[in-house]
Amino acid sequence: MFESAEIGHSIDKETYEKEVAVLREALLEAQYELKQQARFPVIILINGIEGAGKGETVKLLNEWMDPRLIRVESFLLPTDEELSRPPQWRFWRRLPPKGTTGIFFGNWYSQMLYARVTGEIKDSQLDGLIGDAERFERMYSDEGALIFKFWFHLSKKQLKERLKALENDPSRSWQLSEVDWKQSEVYDKFVRYGERVLRRTSRDYAPWYVVEGSDERYRSLTVGRTILESLQAALKRKDRPTPQPHAAPLVSSLDNKGLLDALDLSLSLDKDQYKEQLAKEQARLATLMRDKRFRSHSLIAVFEGNDAAGKGGAIRRVTDALDPRQYRIVPIAAPTEEERAQPYLWRFWRHIPARRQFTIFDRSWYGRVLVERVEGFASDADWLRAYAEINDFEEQLANYNIVLVKFWLSIDQETQLERFKERESIPFKRFKITEEDWRNRDKWDLYVDAVGDMVDRTSTEIAPWTLIEANDKRYARVKVLRTINYALEAAYGSSKKSKKD
Amino acid sequence: MFESAEIGHSIDKETYEKEVAVLREALLEAQYELKQQARFPVIILINGIEGAGKGETVKLLNEWMDPRLIRVESFLLPTDEELSRPPQWRFWRRLPPKGTTGIFFGNWYSQMLYARVTGEIKDSQLDGLIGDAERFERMYSDEGALIFKFWFHLSKKQLKERLKALENDPSRSWQLSEVDWKQSEVYDKFVRYGERVLRRTSRDYAPWYVVEGSDERYRSLTVGRTILESLQAALKRKDRPTPQPHAAPLVSSLDNKGLLDALDLSLSLDKDQYKEQLAKEQARLATLMRDKRFRSHSLIAVFEGNDAAGKGGAIRRVTDALDPRQYRIVPIAAPTEEERAQPYLWRFWRHIPARRQFTIFDRSWYGRVLVERVEGFASDADWLRAYAEINDFEEQLANYNIVLVKFWLSIDQETQLERFKERESIPFKRFKITEEDWRNRDKWDLYVDAVGDMVDRTSTEIAPWTLIEANDKRYARVKVLRTINYALEAAYGSSKKSKKD
């Protein structure tokens, strides 16, 4: 895999200087065009052998291009805000907005290789991380991102010469990482694991470019030209290169019977039962949240449901039990400008709770496969790929000991009509009902299909959906609380869940 | 000051329940109206004696109002991301967006009182912090924010009873802070310093409300009614209650001679001088940035100047000297949606560098007294108050050992015309010139006035302006680099600056 990067490529000075003059102009022009179109971000991952010119290349790109449109992100030791969230969070928070370029000097690849070379993780864990990287890049590319992955290579002999040179030059010593590259054992391991990583993650949508690092001119020109050509091509394509879905979009179930039809919406609690059970479940939640074992967890509750199904009331019954410093409610409305400049899941990642915190999403990332699907805001390709992306996302949360509960509050059409009318007649509730709510009612069947597909495709062992029979608000509220309590107990108890509902 | 809060206020249950029903409805309605108008944020500061009902009140407000439109922010131990920036940063980053409510449970007042009561700081430092709070709140109010400051009070006797009750109730023990309130000495100090703080910071635009905490019903109703009435009044006022400036807006200097006229724009360097001096200053900067003493500093460089004065080129000569991980360039364009929902300075605070980092602002917070003044985007009152607000802001940076250099790159009208024409004729530069640039030229004199006033009012000992003669790009670039180097050396040397330029 690295053979062609050990043959001693080089370029003479004259050719270099002539080429660079043209290249710089073209790169700048492409950069401004990227900014103007603002359709997609560019991300450049810098990896490879120590001393092979990673740092110099990053510096050079900053000199050649307009540095105001580039952000170099280096990932040194994670901050404590980063350590208290899933490891992917620190990368998500620094993704470049559309129209700009992010250079990730240090990234998920350097982290996994460092961990493997130092023996911190085993092959099987490395493979897991490789899979994560693949899925992330697939998603990022589907969202339109242009991804470059450069691997700077040196033969063992070249490395030894470079290291000597670097050591004697204190102004460049920052280019040396913690791993002790002087040992040839490190080189061997790094190349071996590097190859494994590159082999698996070099894909059409995010290929690796292996660059021989020994000759500065060759190296620089190769990187510059690679970026320029792909960027120009991407700017010319007016559409995102999103592949059309192979399969037809999902179809309604043939017998017209859905998951939601199976719910017994007559379930209810009388006032006394409600009072007693609510108090009991609230006390239980308060205790569970103060349990020492919560220190190694955090909690996310997702509320989806029909309009007027009682999400707000159910949320309030949950928060009533808690210290207001323990939770945060994130109402999901239309994305802001900054959010629209990022991949779909970015605006949810930014609200992921730190350890020992509880975040309630009032509507959520499922918007893509619900309202965006039904209203046609997302293309078929986009919402169809969302199921798998969401499953990946939730797996990353679960791996970090985040307890995730997801509710669909379900009511029937008659109940909804009653509640709409009630809302219109009470002054302080009139803000809760809009024209749009009425329009959504006409799409009832489309939503039934969307919910059915959503549950079928995203109710997983690590993050199951709980359907809530919500015609009776009292029954719904108690079931919500009880479900959260079970989930916390299961998480405390063991990895084996004991669902009793 | 606390006399009326020790007389044993109380309200009977029946009155309370009747009033609360009405109050809750009205609060909800006001909240939705606030959201719809989205003109201003509401901030509620919670302070006072331990056990006087602070936590309970926060909880109650969450129950009464729509918790989706409230964010409770508690300020416990600062994270390391917070510790590596000026102390105000952690508050700025959590200010509620317009249309929403932030409850600051713990805030600048609790921090200063804690520090004073424990003896960490002296009276003079307390006074300094009081001044900071006053200036911040004045600014925040001028930006439209509705500010509530609640002080929950108990007499010493009442406190003792409450503490006993809290101790015996483990589910409420989270309400107890670290300070040992059981000692009556702590109470005395807290009340004494509390009074000093309240006296100074209770202002028309951000008054303190002292609430007797012993009777839960009295306390709750008082807080609820206070919020409701002020909020309703604020919602009715369609304009911000910004006072008109007392003085007339600034006028052109009577003899038509300004600061910029005094610059010798013929200053220049020939190619050889430039090459030599640039290399020297770049090497000096590289060394200074790697100096151990930089570890306790950070660096901000602000670039302002006429259109086409060469800001971009000067910035590039600075960054060429550095490791790309050492700096970040923040180009300031129109504020994003999220930024528009915050006070003016918010979008600059969010980019303040952490310790050992260097941020370059390509245009800056001075936009308010330059383009916004000249174009009429800001009212006279708004840009006139900006001078003092900016001075406060920069003082906070300086107090945290941030080295701040500010450049105005100055060219004359003929030079600008030449450069505009050149830009139009070169393909990859055409993105740098717009219709707006041509329009700005017609306002040359207005900008001259604005720059003069800006320098007069914001060139301070801690953050002086450096005017750069920029008709000759070479001269300008070297002077920029040299100025940054002087500033770093001065910061390393001592607090006494040795400006030699």
Image (spheres, coloured by chain):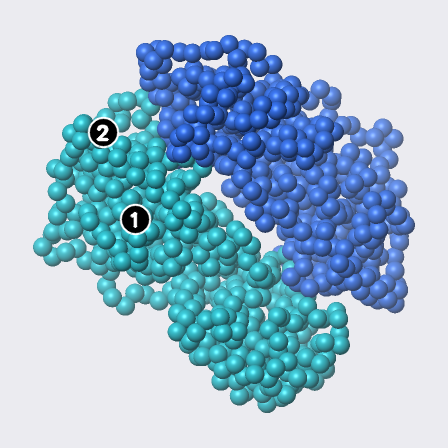
Chain colours: A blue, B cyan
Q: Can residue A293 be seen in this view?
A: yes
Q: What element carries label 1?
A: helix
Q: Quadrant of residue B228?
A: bottom right
Determine which residue is flagged by label 2: B275
Looking at the rendering, in which quadrant would you find the N terminus of chain A?
A: top right
Position in image of residue B170 (x %, y %): 75, 71
Residue A334 sits above or below residue A125 on the image: below
Q: Which amino acid does label 2 sit on?
A: Lys
How crowded pointer 1 is (Cα within 10 Å; few <14, some 14-19, many 20+) is rated as some
Whole-angstrom CA distance, mark 1 to mark 2, is 23 Å
Tell me whether marks 1 and 2 sit on the same chain. Answer: yes
Say whether residue A147 is left or right of residue B205.
right
Residue B489 shows which numbered tag? 1
Residue B436 sits above or below residue A413 on the image: above
For image coordinates 56% across by 66% down, the residue present is B106
For image coordinates 43% across by 74% down, the residue present is B122
Q: Can residue B138 be seen in this view?
A: no
Q: In which quarter of the image is residue A356?
A: bottom right
Q: Which amino acid does label 1 sit on?
A: Glu
Residue A150 shows which numbered tag? none
Residue B445 sits above or below residue B453 on the image: above
For image coordinates 33% across by 46% down, the residue present is B302
Which of the pair B490/A229 is nearer the observer? B490
Between disc 1 and disc 2, the foreground one is 1
For image coordinates 37% across by 36% down, the residue present is B322
